[in-house]
Amino acid sequence: MENLYITYNKNNSLGDLYTVSRGSVSYTAFQTHIAFINWVALHELTLSLVSNGKGFAHYRVMKKSIEEKYILSIDQIPSGCVPIHHLCNGQYVRSYLQITEEMNTIYLPAPYSDLYLPLNYWDCESMVCEGVYIIP
C-alpha cells in the first residue's frame, strides 16, 4: 500500500491549492478548499501534518490508500458502492467508490467498454470545485 501525500500551497501561486501525490506521481489536485475538504470527507481520510513551511504545508494520509480498478461490465461493481463522477482519461465518467477501513477502491469504466460514457465536463468541473462528488 503506497502512501498518499498532500501539499497545501498556502499562497496558491502555482495554480492548485492542494496536490495529492502517490510516491513521486501526482494523483489529483484541487483548486478550492471546499473541494479538497469534501474529497477528504468522502474518502474518510485522516491527515497527519509532516511539515509546515512559509508557503507550503505537507500532510500524509494515515492508514488508508486509494486504488483504481478498470471494469468492463456493471456486474464487476461490488454491492454497496457509491456512484461518483471521477476523471478517467481526461473525461468525467460515472464511477463507483467502495470504502473500507484500509483501502478505498474506485471502479472506473474501461475506456473501450460500453460503460465509458463521458459526462459533461464543465457541469462536473463546477460541481467538483464546489465539493460535490456523489452522483444523485
Image: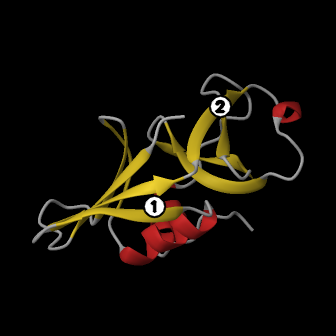
Residue 114's place in the image compared with 86, above or below, is above
Pointer 2 residue: 69
Provide the secondary structure element on which disc 2 rests: strand
Residue type beneath disc 1: Trp
Residue 41 falls left or right of residue 57 = right
Q: Are marks 2 and 1 in contact (CB under 8 Å)?
A: no
Image location (x, y in percent) of residue 92: 54, 48
Which residue is pictured at 45% across the width and 61% down the height? Answer: 122
Provide the secondary structure element on which disc 1 rests: helix
Is 2 in front, or is 107? 2
Pointer 1 residue: 122
Image location (x, y in percent) of residue 116: 66, 35
Which residue is pictured at 83% across the width and 31% down the height? Answer: 76
Residue type beneath disc 2: Lys
Residue 110's place in the image compared with 46, above or below, is above
Is 99 in front, or is 131? 99
